[in-house]
Amino acid sequence: MRSIAVIAVTGKGGTGKTIFASMLILHLCRKGSLLAVDADPDSNLPEALGVEEVEKTLGDVKEVFQHTRDEIRGDKSIWFEAKVFEVINELEDFDLLVMGRPEGEGCYCYTNNLLRGILRKFMKHYDFVVVDCEAGLEHFSRKTIDKADCVVVVSDTSKKGLKTAERISELMENLGINARKAIVGNKITDAKAEEMIENFASRAGFEFLGALPYDNMVVENEMAGKSVRDLPECEFKRNFKEVLKKFESWCLS
Ligand SMILES: Nc1ncnc2c1ncn2[C@@H]1O[C@H](COP(=O)(O)OP(=O)(O)OP(=O)(O)O)[C@@H](O)[C@H]1O
Ligand SMILES: [Mg+2]
C-alpha cells in the first residue's frame, strides 16, 4: 500500500492559509499524485489555483444524501461513493475536491460516518492530500477527515493568530489527531515579529518553518485576478522556497 502524506493547512482567518496551501499544492503535485481539498465553506482555493468555477461540491452531494437516503435503493454507500467520485475535479496536474457549504440542521452522524470511510478510501489513491482548512478544523472535528500527518498553522504576529494556533493544538489533542504540527509566519514585516513567532513555536511545541514577508506583489497579483501560478519572482516567493525546504525535511522525511 502507498504511503500518503495528508497535510492540513489552518490558522486564523485571513492569515494566508489559502495562498500557502496553493503554493504547496503547486510544488507537491510535481512530485507525485495530489488531491487538493478545499475544506473552508467560505474559501477560494480554486481561484487561488487558477481553476475556473467549481460547480458541484461535496456539501451538495452530502445534503442530497442526508435528505434522500431512505429512498435510495440497494447499497447506500455505493450510491454515495459514486456521487463523491463525481465531484472530484480531475485537473491537469492534480485533483480538486471542494467541500462546500456547512451542514444544515439535524444529525449528520450517519452521513458523516459513511463519508469518512469513502474519503479515506479515495485519499489512498494519492501520494499527497493537501487540505485548506478553516480555523475551526470543522471537517476534523466532525471527523469527515480523520487522518492528518502534518498540520501547518499559518499565523501573522497578532495575538489572535497565535491564540488560534494554541486552540488548534488543544483541539488536535482532544480529537486524538496524532499529527506533527508546525507554524509558519506570514505577512511578517520585521525580524522582531519573526522572532516572536519562533519563540512561540518552541514554547508551544510547534516546528517553526520560517517567516514569509508581507509583499505587495502578492496583493497586486490577487487584485489583477491572477492565480498564484502567475505570481512573479518576489520576496514572498524567494522566502517560500526556504520554507519549503524546511517543510520537506520536516514533513516528508
Ligand atoms: N505575504 C503576503 N503579503 C501580502 N498579502 C498577503 C500575503 N499573504 C496573503 N496575503 C493576502 O491576504 C489575504 C488573505 O490571504 P488568504 O486568502 O491566503 O488567507 P486565508 O487565511 O486563506 O483567508 P480566509 O480565512 O479568508 O480563508 C489575501 O488578499 C492575500 O492576497
Ligand atoms: Mg482561505
Image (cartoon, rainbow, N blue to C red):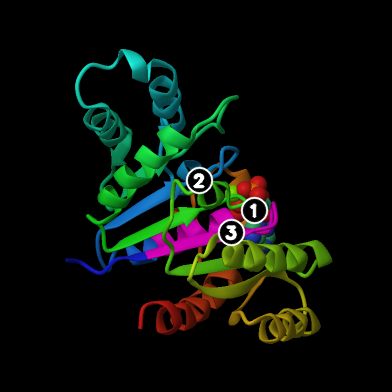
User: In the displayed structure, does residue 199 sit left or right of residue 115?
Assistant: right
- What residue lies at 55% left-to-right and 68% top-to-bottom? 152
The image shows residue 99 at horizontal and vertical percentages of 46, 39
Would residue 20 be counted in the magenta stretch? yes
The image shows residue 55 at horizontal and vertical percentages of 41, 26
- What residue lies at 81% left-to-right and 66% top-to-bottom? 158
Front-lying residue, 242 or 164: 164
Of helix, strand and loop, which one carries label 2? loop
- What residue lies at 60% left-to-right and 63% top-to-bottom? 174
Q: Disc 1 to disc 3, how far (Cα)?
A: 6 Å
Cβ atoms at labels 1 and 3 below 8 Å apart: yes
Would residue 18 be counted in the magenta stretch? yes
Query: What residue did someone put label 2 on?
Result: 39
- Going from N to C along the chain, the mark reached first, 1 or 2, is 2
Front-lying residue, 153 or 144: 144
Query: What residue did someone put label 1 on?
Result: 135
